[in-house]
Amino acid sequence: MIDQPPHTRAAPSGHTVLVVEDDDSIRTLLTSALGVAGYAVASAASGQEAMFEAGNRRPHLIVLDVMLPDVDGFQLTRDLRAQGVYTPVLFLTARTGVEDRIIGLSSGGDDYVTKPFHVQEVLLRIRAILRRSNAPASVTSPPLHYADLSLDEATREVRRGDRPVKLSPTEFRLLACLIRHAERVLEKAEILQQVWQYDFSGDTRIVDTYIKNLRRKIDHSRPALIHTVRGVGYCLRLPRDGTREADR
C-alpha cells in the first residue's frame, strides 16, 4: 500500500521522471510506483501537456504512452528531438508487433515496454536507461577520434570534420562503441551487450535501426565510415577499394 503521494517524495538520486499516459488508472499506478521507488514524478495526459512539462520540468526520463489522444507518441518523440530535447524515452504501448517497436526506437526512443506490463519491469527498464545515460565519463579520458570523426565523452560533443552532430543518448553510446573498436567487425549481439547492456529477446534489429540513424547523421559527409559486414555485424572504417554502396 502506498502511504504517501509520489510528488512529496524526493528522488535520492535527483532523477525526475515524466509519465505521459492518458489512461488515469495506468498513470496513477506508474506515478505512485515511481514515487515509492524514490523518483520525483511529473505527469501529463496528452502530448500538449507533455511538451509543456518536458520544457518546464526538464525530466531525466520520459515514460511515454504511444496512443495519446492528440498525438502519436512516436511523433511526439520526433518533435522533442527536433527541438533539441534528447531526454531518454521509454515507450509504453499495446502494439506488440516488432515493426512497431522498431518504428518507435527509430523515432528516438530508448526502450519499449508492451501492455499489459509488470510495474517491476518498467522500473527495471527505467533504472537501466538512467544508468546508461548517466554513466560518468572519466575526466582524464581523451576524446575519441577516427578519420575526421571525433567524440568527447566528457562534453558529450560529436563532430564530423567541422560539423557538429546532434545524437540521442543511445546513438552517442553506439557511436562511442564503434569508435573504440574502429576497423574491427562487431557482431550485433556484442553491440547489444555493450550499448544496451541487455538483449532484446534475441531481436538484433534494434541495432540495424540505430545504425541506420547514425548513418543518416554521420555519413552525411563523405567518405562513409559505417559499413555492414553481411551476416556478421558492423564496422567503423574508411572505405576500401572495391567497396560497393550496397554493402554499406
Image (cartoon, rainbow, N blue to C red):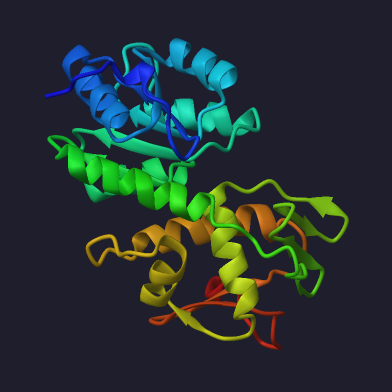
Is 146 placed above or below 83 here? below
Is residue 245 among the parts visible in the rendering?
no
User: Residue 27's spot in the image, x, y percent?
Assistant: 25, 19
User: Residue 246's spot in the image, x, y percent?
Assistant: 54, 72
In which quarter of the view is residue 112 placed?
top left
Q: Residue at x 33, y 36 (%)?
A: 91
Left or right of residue 181, residue 2 in this image? left
User: Residue 173's spot in the image, x, y percent?
Assistant: 56, 60
Q: In the rendered view of the protein, which quadrant contains the C terminus?
A: bottom right
Count numbered badges in the picture: 0
- Please, which residue is most extreme toward the right here? 162
Q: Residue at x 15, y 38 (%)?
A: 117
Is residue 58 among the parts visible in the rendering?
yes
Left or right of residue 18, residue 149 in this image? right
User: Residue 132's spot in the image, x, y percent?
Assistant: 48, 55
Q: In the rendered view of the protein, which quadrant contains the N terminus?
A: top left
In which quarter of the view is residue 82 placed?
top right
Left or right of residue 191, residue 23 in this image? left
Left or right of residue 6, residue 95 in this image? left
